[in-house]
Image (cartoon, rainbow, N blue to C red):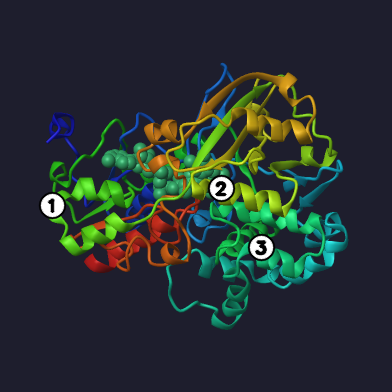
Amino acid sequence: MPSQLAKLEVPKADAIVVGSGPNGLAAAICLGQAGWKVVVLEAADTPGGGVRSAELTLPDFVHDICSSVYAMVVCSPFLSKLPLEKFGLQWAYPPAALAHPMDDGTAAVLHKSVDETAHSLGTDGAGYRKLMGSLVSRWQDIMEDSFAPLRLPRHPVFFAKFGLNAIRPATSLAEAYFKTERGRAFFAGITAHSMLPLDKLTTSAVALVLALAAHARGWPFARGGSQQLTSVLIAYLKSLGGEVITNCRVESLDQLPPARATLLDVTPRQLLKIAGDRLPESYRHKLERYRYGVGAYKIDWALHQPIPWRAQECSTAGTVHLSGSLEEARESERLPWQGRTSDKPFVLLTQPSLFDPSRAPAGKHTAWGYCHVPNGYSGNMTEAIENQVERFAPGFRDCIAARSVMGPVEFEQHNANLIGGDIGGGVADLGQLFLRPTASLYKTPLKGVYLCSASTPPAPGVHGMCGYFAAQAALKLRA
Ligand SMILES: Cc1cc2nc3c(=O)[nH]c(=O)nc-3n(C[C@H](O)[C@H](O)[C@H](O)COP(=O)(O)OP(=O)(O)OC[C@H]3O[C@@H](n4cnc5c(N)ncnc54)[C@H](O)[C@@H]3O)c2cc1C
């Protein structure tokens, strides 16, 4: 047993949560609300997992190390109901959620209004209205059923209608609803958040939920950096009597004191190590077969000035998707699954300082951008990513004051859950989206031990619902 934790005095608690990512904190808060005393043990020296920020480049330039855009927090059936603003959280809402620049110097824009969005899509506007129009008024029902494990939907008829489109491959839905490259490229860009080849089943679900979130609430940043969101979640947890201990890596369940429940914000590979021989062989085999997905290669930039987009509309959007066509995005998202990368990668870029001046010194700016690469990739995508930005914003390179680069290796060092740089806690395709990581979901064969990470439903994103449902499982068992 490692001596560090053996020596640590973990305060007496009803529940121990291992890992302080958004799911670990959501689980802790849910148990705290039920009156349980909860202690969260975190391996890193700063809490938050995928919700942390730091001065990665130059002093006073604050960068979101992992997640940056919190559409899923403001739409989450659990997190959105917490008194986060009361504990000091401020959201920075860009006027537009997303812009997708085209090679002709214009951009398609995801606005709060469906009509304005449709207008920016030109002749494909009619297809967008047909696809999204009827969903917007029912967004809360859709979120409630989407951010949940597989169960009889609360709104079965409506959800079945939504599900028929959501389950389709993104390429097929794009071709069915959009006739021009503008609409197809725009839709393909949103589906690329799925981290799957775009011709896989369920890839449309991600685009529909994210577009709906933009129309319902917007895609905000956490003012001051994503660490602020974590700090506020912890402040609320403390108000419920909980606490978080950092610099505390749990190597084995044997290191933990007895508690009513132990919730692990880790992925299956770590569970295999932490629970060791205690797990029955059949369950171990299932965990061993769990599949991890492609990795991320990310650059954070400190900039002398805002990005000089050719399409003005890009400066009104928090997020910008860089890829010329559906075909280009399809190729970029397919190659990493074959151990290759594209020369023109699909780049997901955010520019928080345009809407939150506290991110950089006066007049200066930050930007965050990444592309998908093979799991464990150790090559260099910096030039390819910057070429894509330069393509839609000539002169971008001259604006760079400093950059920080993180590939799969650095990501896994930063957070043990990012196996091979997989930012999704495992592939979220049809085979692993609903029964994740096994059909037992949050429950493990060990009494009182639960999984609460993004490797459980409803999979990745900062929505806290994996933690919420794991805590519900623990509470039901012990109630
Ligand atoms: C580059 C990148 C960009 C992203 N962008 C977005 C975005 O814009 N919006 C969005 O919604 N989502 C985004 N995500 C995804 C989001 O960050 C994750 O889905 C989310 O953080 C998962 O939360 P979690 O609690 O399951 O795990 P994590 O956030 O990964 O937290 C796990 C925690 O457990 C700790 N831990 C692991 N093992 C141990 C151990 N043995 N002992 C103690 N502690 C341990 C880790 O140190 C970590 O703090 C992004 C992720 C990455 C990496």
Q: Secondary structure at mark 1?
A: helix
Q: Position of residue 33 (x, y in %)?
A: 36, 56
Q: Secondary structure at mark 3?
A: helix
* Mark 3, other Cα within 10 Å: few <14 / some 14–19 / many ≥20: many
Task: Give the side of residue 349 with respect to residue 109, left or right.
Answer: left
Give the residue type that dot 1 points to.
Asp
User: What quarter of the picture does the N terminus occupy?
Assistant: top left
Give the residue type that dot 3 points to.
Thr
Task: Give the side of residue 264 with respect to residue 88, left or right.
Answer: left
Q: CA distance from mark 3 to mark 2?
A: 16 Å
Q: CA distance from mark 3 to mark 1?
A: 44 Å
Q: Position of residue 234 (x, y in %)?
A: 40, 41
Q: Position of residue 103 (x, y in %)?
A: 82, 42
- Answer whether residue 35 is visible to the viewer in this image: no
Residue pointed to by mark 3: 171
The mark closer to the camera, 3 or 2, is 2
Residue pointed to by mark 1: 277
Q: Are marks 3 and 1 in contact (CB under 8 Å)?
A: no
* Mark 1, other Cα within 10 Å: few <14 / some 14–19 / many ≥20: few
